[in-house]
Image (cartoon, rainbow, N blue to C red):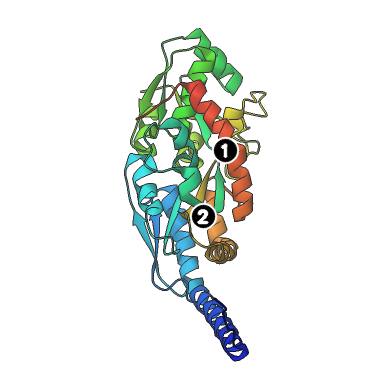
Amino acid sequence: MSISINRRNVLQGAAAFAGTSLLGDLHAQTAKEHWPSKPIKLVVPFNAGGATDILARAFGEGLSKRVGQPVLIDNRLGGSGIVGTEAVVKSPADGQTLLMSLSSSMLAFQYLYTKLPYNPQKDIALVTQVCSAPVVLAVHPSVPVSNMKELIAYCKANKGKLSFGSYGVGSYAHLAGAYLSKTTDSDITHAAYKGESQMIQELIGGQFQFGFLSAQNVKPFADSGRVKAIGVTGRHRMQVMPNVPTIYEQGVQDDAYSLVGWIAMGAPAGVSKEIIAQLYGHMLEVSKDPKVQERITTAGFTPMMSSPEQFRENYLRDMPVWKSMVETAGAKLD
């Protein structure tokens, strides 16, 4: 069978195809221009009034002004951040639902939980790390130590007699305390609390001997002498507590104490690169607001505003450290 090809039909078909392609480009451009098409939901999987929530509201206000749509904060509590994070990753990948959370739920939990309802590496699109979040190692005034090396020696000399507090199972405070217990063979008891407010009151009351806490919450009590701040995590001192040396500069250079958590923005996997790029650009501009900068630094954090590509690099670098920390601590949850 022969097939007759009419030149006119071919030209008409080509024109139609070109028109379809152009129409597709116009639709894509229009979709890009119209993001966001409705109010943005920014999920914070923690309590209102906490550091993550405060920063989410500061950035949300600035983002709203830039995109011309309200940014609604949704405090979705439960599971130390798991419930809210799961809600985001199961949302449509249209850039209308976003996440502001911690390195715990966005990274570390994949090593801690055997039944995590999402895969952080596959289900979360990384937008930007808003800030790094070093924490303060604080001890009760009755504990006769003034630095990390002395605390290590004290733990070894008091095997089975000490306890440490944390603001949640699976948090850095929990894993770091368990890591210290394991590496010193000290059998230190873990006292878990539902938040830092209760935890710090119990530390002041002497219910446990030490714990890792945010600068925002511990600074007033350290300044008044009700607790002793003996070190901070990471490689750089905090602007808000410049006289407290890092654990690293004290000569205890384990990766577990050099590791710094972070607060970051994520989205459901599948959100287009164009929307991610727009979102990051807006967030970067919002971060330049002096009021936003002040919110970050007064909480004891350090601004980062990593690009999506930098975020991915940092994420891959931190992964083996978190994994090793969880394994060394022997922590595992269902």
Asked where in the image residue 99 lies, by quadrant, the reply is bottom left
Q: Which residue is mark 1?
A: 260
Q: Where is residue 151 shown, x and y percent of the image?
A: 54, 18
Viewer-proximal residue among 43 and 301: 43
Residue at the bottom extreme?
8
Residue bearing the label numbered 2? 295
Quadrant for the C terminus, please.
top left
Residue sitting at x 39%, y 34%: 167
Q: In the picture, residue 174 is in which quadrant?
A: top left
Q: Which residue: 34% across, 35% down?
A: 198
Q: Residue at x 61, y 36 (%)?
A: 234
- Which three-letter amino acid code belongs to the residue tagged 1? Val
Label pair 2/1, CB-CB below 8 angstroms: no
Q: From this viewpoint, is residue 165 visible?
A: yes
**Which residue is at the far front?**
1
Ranked by sequence position, the earlier of labels 2 and 1 is 1
As drawn, is 205 to the left or to the right of 35?
left
Q: Position of residue 184 (x, y in %)?
A: 53, 14
Q: Nearer the viewer, residue 280 or 70?
A: 280
Labels 2, 1: front one:
1
Foreground residue among 257 and 239: 257
Write the residue at 64% across / 23% down.
252
| Mark 2 residue type | Arg
Crowding at label 2, few (<14), some or many (≥20) Cα neighbours within 10 Å?
some
Under circle 1, the secondary element is loop
Q: Percent x, y for residue 161?
A: 41, 11
Q: Quadrant of the N terminus?
A: bottom right
Q: Residues within 10 Å of mark 1 (few under 14, many from 20)?
A: some
Residue 206 can be seen in this image: no
Image side of residue 193 versus residue 7, left or right? left
Q: Quadrant of residue 8?
A: bottom right
